[in-house]
Amino acid sequence: PIEHHVKDISSTKATAETIDVLNKNIEELNQKLKEADKEIVRLKQVQTLAAVDIMINKKTTLNKVSVLVETVENYDSDMLKTAASSLTEKLKSGIVFLASKNNDKLTFYSKVSDDLVQKGFNAGILVKEAAKITGGGGGGQANAAQAGGKDISKLNDALEKVKELISSHRS
């Protein structure tokens, strides 16, 4: 009988040590995961800023306004905001409208420089109209707005509507 208790005690001690080792391993893995997540964010920033340097060359002029209407692939909200902010900064005065295709969904993000907001241009209206055409919704402020869409087949129609709204705007 006493041998049985000794066996139980040593088994319990071994189990406690195993749990401690497992907890330490879990902690280490969580730390590595956090570091990997930070690296992913950093790489997305690098990718976005590199793409901005290419996109800026695609700007056009509509209604005497510098405009960039561009489709990108698999940009999340943060990447869209970073790209739009950087592009607007490079344009100084202009309108940026980005559409990201993510699987079967669309995300629209628009940014309008302050001088053009004062002339009545509105990012919220641009994204809202694009979203409406693609079966989605959203909106925002006059200087920056985001919306989503569901019907990717209507993306070109939505982008044409954005260009039309900018072209037909009267200050």
Image (cartoon, grey):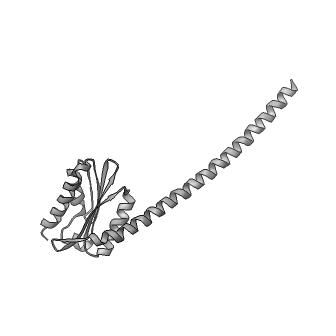
Taking the spot 25% from the left edge, 71% from the top edge, the residue there is: 59
Where is residue 97 shown, x and y percent of the image?
A: 26, 63
**Residue in the foreground of this view, choosing between 127 and 58:** 58
Give how far across and how far down residue 126 sits, in percent: 22, 60
In the visual, does 164 lie left or right of 96?
A: left
130 w.r.t. 5: above or below:
below
Total marks shown come to 0
Left or right of residue 157: residue 15: right
Residue 163, by quadrant, is bottom left
Q: Using residue 22 as the reference point, say whether residue 7 is left or right of it.
A: right
- Which residue sits at x=34%, y=70%? 54
Q: Nearer the viewer, residue 125 or 38?
A: 38
User: Is residue 50 rendered to the left or right of residue 70?
Assistant: right
Specify whether residue 129 is in view: no
Residue 104, image x and y in percent? 32, 47
Q: Residue furthest right?
A: 2
Q: Residue at x 67, y 44 (%)?
A: 22
Residue at coordinates 87% horizontally, 26% vertically from top-left? Answer: 2
Q: Which quarter of the image is occupied by the N terminus?
A: top right
Instruction: Please state, as top left, top right, bottom left or bottom right, where the C terminus lies in the image.
Output: bottom left
- Residue 37, position as x, y percentages in the image: 51, 56
Residue 31 can be seen in this image = yes
